Amino acid sequence: MRRRVVITGLGLITPLGQGKDALWEGLTLPRRVVGPITRFDATGYSTRIAAEVKDFDPTQFMERKDARRASRFIQFAIGATHLALQDAQLAITDANREQVGVLIGSGIGGIDYMDTQVRLLDRHGPDRVSPFLPAMMISDMASGMVSIQFGVKGPNLCAVTACSTGADAIGLATRLIQYGDAEVMLAGGSEAAIEPIGIAGFCAARAMSTRNDDPEHASRPFDAERDGFVMGEGAGVLVLESLEHAQARGARIYAEVLGYGMTADAYHITQPDPEGDGALRAMRKAIHDAGLQPTDIDYINAHGTSTRYNDAKETLAIKRLLGEDAYRVPVSSTKSVTGHLLGAAGAVEAAICVLALQHQTIPPTINYEHPDPECDLDYVPNQARPATLRTVMTNSFGFGGHNSVLVLGQV
Amino acid sequence: MNQEIFERVQKVIVEQLGVDENAVVPEASFTDDFNADSLDLVELVMAFEQEFDVSISEEEAERVRTVADAVRMLTEKVQADE
């Protein structure tokens, strides 16, 4: 009998603001936060819009010196961890610090540092490159700095699976608790890639929406007129605990991680399998891992990036999973509101699923106006919907052909 | 001690090490009083190089332990340049 793993804390830094309440309110109102890029002058870029985290002050969460040396994705991770521990009312003490681990991933890592340091190298030579570059560009440093800041000494590692990163971090952290490597894991993803080189690369890959004149309606998953994703940024960190540990300390338990499934497409570096094969098998594995049937799923939080391929192939995979029942299961993409947080998306969307369970409400897919014959499911268009939710599923797929799926349920 | 150079050194230290301006006194030690690690010191020396448009060798950097050491070294360099 494997150990049960529950979610007891949510820490969020998203384009909708800080904390779970700002996220949930923004999703269900809904708020529209996609706008012109302000982090740098994006003149000349084919995509000039994004969902930025505004007014983030890292010194709210860390010393000025540490904040100054940390790249932005690390600042987000530390902020989100603070909020998660606070939400879980979990104090780190000498009695528990060795039982608490960290698994916070990032798809891209410290590209802000890389961007500025390469410019310095070009302009002024190698002697001007910061000694902090090696530490601040590597994706594992969010986990590293979180362990240092909070003094937690259990397992410490990082998942890097592009846009599946956040989901894999939570899935793998769950496995660590199930196996007994830790009692508590601070797990999630963090991303801050709205930087010149980050945006330029995705522009060149033709992956992002170019609806620059109408940013509020640019992220439109499953809509016939979708033309690419909108980049977001931020972090999601969840406090995961063994059920016994959570019960022993009298923690408020939000939900249980019931199942986790992961597969590879083995098809193409950026495009999904034409038959949605990898996505389908990942969903099946997660549901099997949870000991459930596909029809037990009450809501699917889709990967739903608003790209032509993803949304069509994900829809196909869901229809292959559920058959005729697919038309009865609500599917929504919250990226329509938050933008695509890349390596943080899976963690933020797991948190959204927890909030959906808590509020018994499904957050909508906004900007849904024109049906696409290839996307013909119930996407919960434009308005939040009250529903009876016991078991929910969240999909995350990443460049490289990674597919990662989590099934969460009420305890 | 050259007051103008001291003030510029002070400004760089406050910015780089995140310490209070009043703590940056001549006798303060970077490692003991400001908790600077080896990476901080490398970056601090780079910031001095930039601020004063001088070049500081590794050997010279190693001899700088206090605020006064930095001011002395930078004063010599700036005067040598003039």
Image (spheres, rainbow, N blue to C red):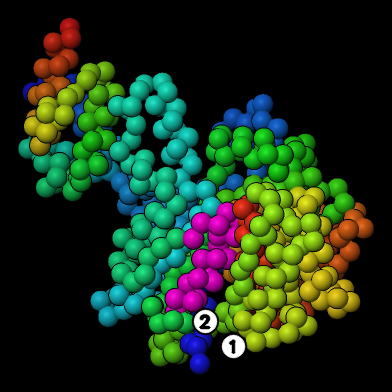
Q: From this viewpoint, is residue A16 visible? A: no
- Amino acid type at mark 1: Val
**SS under mark 2:** strand
Q: Is residue A319 left or right of residue A15?
A: right
* Mark number, residue A411: 1
Magenta residues, as a range? Answer: A159-177
In the image, what residue occupies the spot 15% across and 41% down? Answer: B30
Give percent across and percent down for residue A241: 46, 80
Does residue A195 lie above or below A364 as drawn? above
> In which quadrant will I find the C terminus of chain A?
bottom right
Residue B12: % across, % down: 26, 32
Q: Is residue A73 visible?
A: yes
Q: Which residue is mark 2?
A: A6
**Dot placed on the residue nearer the N-terminal end, 2 or 1:** 2
Quarter-wise, where is residue A288 in the image? bottom right
Q: Nearer the viewer, residue A243 or A383?
A: A243
Give the residue furthest to the front. Answer: A266
Horizontal placement of A248 versus A358: left or right? Answer: left
Specify few, some or many for label 1: CA neighbours under 10 Å numbering under 14, 14-19, or 20 or more: some
Q: Foreground residue, A152 or A406? A: A406
Q: Are marks 2 and 1 in contact (CB under 8 Å)?
A: yes
Type of amino acid under label 2: Val
